Image (cartoon, helix red, strand yellow):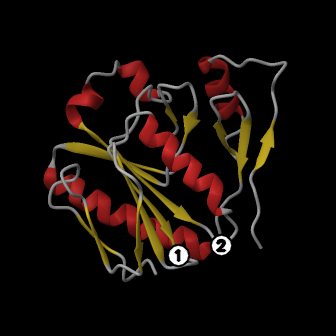
Amino acid sequence: MVMSPLTLNLDAVHLTNEQFYQLCQNNRELKFERTVNGELIVMAPTGGETGNRNFKLIQQLANWADSDGTGIGFDSSTCFNLPNGADRSPDAAWIPLEKWNSLTPEEQKKFPPICPDFVIELRSPSDALKPLQEKMQEYIDNGTRLGWLINRKDRQVEIYRQGQPKEVLESPMTLFGEDVLFNFILNLESIW
């Protein structure tokens, strides 16, 4: 069953970044995102199978990031305040160290006002595809250099790159980090 996250229209309420952060801190049992239009999105938790597959994605990215040392990775709990004003939480993300270190300690502690250079979204069985595709395009429009939308249901990967049309791969067994994540290879065998 495909479900959409709960979206609250807050036209009459304009939350500042600090108020949004406090709302999230006061409701830690919920996961929120905020659109560029100020709509509040309440994200549903994933099931066990999707949670396990996301764990395996993050594990591979974390292992590479630790050995590479040129940047740091993030899990799906991290909310980024994008340049367009939206607050988004990719399933996995990576930022080069020099970009991360340009933030103040306070900015690093809260929702970093930065767009990751690399993001992964893993489609859950309950996720509608179109909103995920729109979210991927939003990352690219805000500065993400490489993004992977992994659609387990259809065994497809959509690859998003700056200045290029999206590429769709059918049942790939590996993905390459290209010039963004140099020498990173994601093994999809345990993800499918």
First reached walking from the N terminus: tag 2 or tag 1:
2
Location of residue 86 with respect to 153 vertically, above or below:
above
Q: In which quarter of the image is the N terminus?
A: bottom right
Residue found 58% across the figure and 31% down from its top: 86
Q: Could you tell me which secondary element the residue under label 1 belongs to?
A: loop
Left or right: 129 with respect to 105?
right
How would you rate the neighbour count of disc 1 (Cα within 10 Å): few for under 14, some for 14-19, many for 20 or more? some
Residue 78 seen in the figure: no
Q: For mark 2, does the 10 Å Cα neighbourhood hold few (<14), some (14 to 19), or many (20 or more) residues?
A: some
Looking at numbered disc 2 in the image, what kind of residue is underneath it? Answer: Pro
Which of the two residues, 31 or 28, is positioned nearer the viewer here? 31
Return the residue nearer the eye: 153 or 71.
153
Residue 38 figure quarter? top right
The amino acid type of the residue labelled 1 equals Arg
Q: Is residue 71 left or right of residue 156?
A: left
Residue occupying image coordinates x 69% and y 28%: 37
Q: Which residue is drawn at 35% across and 79% down?
A: 172
Q: Indicate the secondary structure of the residue bearing disc 2.
A: loop
Image mark for residue 7: none
| Residue 132 x, y percent position in the rendering | 59, 55
Q: Name the residue under label 1.
A: 152
Residue 97 x/y as whole percent = 22, 35
For the residues labelled 2 and 1, say whether their Cβ atoms are less than 8 Å apart. Answer: yes
Position above or below: 45 against 20: below
The numbered dot on residue 125 is 2
Q: Can residue 143 be seen in this view?
A: yes
